[in-house]
Amino acid sequence: MALLHISEPGQTSVPHQRRLAVGIDLGTTNSLVATVRSGLAETLADEAGEHLLPSVVRYRKGQGPQVGQSAKEAAPTDPMNTIVSVKRLMGRDLQELRKNEFAAYEYAGEESSVPRICTEGGDVSAVEVSAEILKVLRDRAEASLGGELTGAVITVPAYFDDAQRQATKDAARLAGLHVLRLLNEPTAAAVAYGLDKKSDGVIAIYDLGGGTFDISVLRLKKGVFEVMATAGDSALGGDDMDRAIARWIMAQAGIQDDADHAQLRRLLHEARRVKEMLTDADETSVEITRMDNTVWRGSLTRMQMNELINSLVKKTINPCRRALRDAGLSIDDISEVVMVGGSTRVPMVREKVEAFFNKPPLVDIDPDKVVAVGAAFQADILAGNKPDEAMLLLDVIPLSLGLETMGGLVEKVINRNTTIPVARAQDFTTYKDGQTAMSIHVLQGEREMVQDCRSLARFSLRDIPPMVAGAARIRVTFQVDADGLLSVAAEEQSSGVQSSIEVKPTYGLEDSEVEQMLRDSMDHASEDMVARMLREQQVEADRAMEALTAALQKDGEKYLDDEERAGIDQQMDSLQTVRQQDDIEAIKLAIARLEKTCAGYVERRMNGSIQDAMSGHKIEEFES
Ligand code: ADP
Ligand code: MG
């Protein structure tokens, strides 16, 4: 529980500079940006007063990308240069895209590289397309809030995998946005309704958008949302309703199946208008211009439309059943149902959902804005605007926890954003022959190198029985309890030697520091990778040279003639030289050369030591 700060009488708390932070719903059909002002979340509109930005980007020759409504209007006539539903392409490889009916573009690039969509305006990746959408939202937010953004919370479907999440993050970085956190869309919707502040329970989030249907079952436990199950249909949404209504209009107006592109576009446009009208009206007029320029006029009632879309709405119920079954729950276990997505405005959808879950769903917040609103609340907290609610962050580990390994590298044991309490174990081994102690250095942070992370604690594991390098099995267990307390224990498995320590990982680390470290880890991600690879190769080189030197000292003379010995010394010298430089490939090559030169020696030595070991022992002694 967070404690509230109360200032002394007569002293008001210091007014602090509000950090500008936004929540972004990067949708398949539409995207939105929202922020919190005076405690209230609101979505931000463009100059024309539109809140929804169609997630469509068009690339033309010699012109900058066109984003939003105007691009959307061009989609039917310029389909190959106009990218719609780019969210379906995120984090996917070429093979996956070629199988995806929604991703019928021309692609360039090798099988193994990031696929690029070929357009008149150049080849673009899904990440770049998404970044264009995010840029427009960022500009809109900065114009409307009058300043640079501290950061953004961007929502992703709960089922998004690591590649899709990473791609989303990359898009944000490309758009010049600092990602405070990626948030699951259903969690954002629940947060928008303040369900995170309510008592524990199970929440169903029903999200019917333009082209996708998602049902998520979340469990709220002590302020932490856990995704229990997700299900859905990636090819079901409001667009299908539009098509059903368009087919009805065609039949009524005597329009044949050979309707051209422009005719189809008019039909779908009118169908959508009619559908949206019938959300509030019981009946509406319908009008369509045929290819011969004659006009058909008629009307459609909500009852009639319900019949046209009935089977589509019914199709959403099976995934709901599946999600409940996967979560091992029955309908009575669901305490709230949250409606998300523009298509949940359709009255029949609400009725069917209410009938299935046996309770009225939450619909007070605009279903197409609710995800962005929830993300905005989270962004406000993560940006540090609500110090009293900072405790909310303690429900997950804000920064990864790990251990120092050879070469000053950090091996992560518990990743950032893992919910607590949690326990994870990892096995390590010794580096040198006969090593009897191990120094354990606990670190926190996202960077690869020890010097860039925060040191939390050090302790030693002693009395490890002497063994050859790599033979000891040292299990290090990290345990973080519900209060955020970390304890680390180490045990050598064969001897049972133990050692442990308790550390408080979050204490002393300011939110701003956390933020800075996250920002650094993003800014330096690729730099870190290279640094890590170099350090790994250097450690590898040291290890090889150390082992070889020890062996040569012991029995070099026994197994090598002078010429062989000179060859090995020469390779060792050149490895020593390149090891000091920062050419990863050169070090690799030098290690390989050294190994090759030593191959004969190593083999003779091995045979010899087996014979040494066997002499004087009975065979049975070796069998255990
Ligand atoms: P996504 O999450 O896929 O980006 P949205 O949540 O923005 O999509 O939903 C878009 C869909 O919502 C479209 O099919 C649109 O026709 C539908 N929609 C929007 N407003 C209404 C309304 N008033 N009545 C019925 N459907 C609506
Ligand atoms: Mg959506």
Image: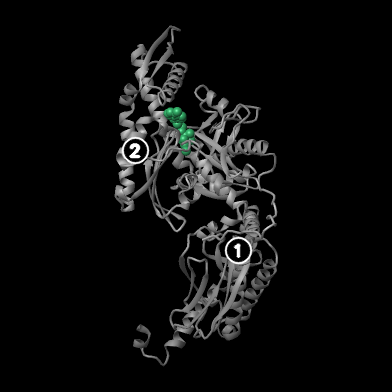
Q: Is residue 605 above or below residue 325?
A: below
Q: Is residue 599 above or below residue 362?
A: below
- For marks 2 and 1 on the same chain, the one whose residue lies earlier in the sequence: 2
* Left or right of 353 on screen, residue 13: right
Q: Position of residue 207 (x, y in %)?
A: 42, 39
Three-letter amino acid code of the residue under disc 2: Val
Between circles 2 and 1, the one closer to the viewer is 2
Number of residue marks: 2
Kindly state the secondary structure of the residue where label 2 is placed. helix
| Residue in the picture at 59% in, 71% down | 406
Q: Nearer the viewer, residue 490 or 109?
A: 490
Q: Nearer the viewer, residue 382 or 264?
A: 382
* 10 Å crowding of disc 2: few (<14), some (14-19), many (20+): many
Kindly state the secondary structure of the residue where label 1 is placed. helix
Q: Position of residue 503 (x, y in %)?
A: 56, 72
Q: Label 2: which residue? A: 353
Q: Position of residue 238 (x, y in %)?
A: 41, 30
Residue 450, by quadrant, is bottom right
Q: Label 1: which residue? A: 588
Instruction: Judge whether residue 471 can be spotted in this image.
Output: no
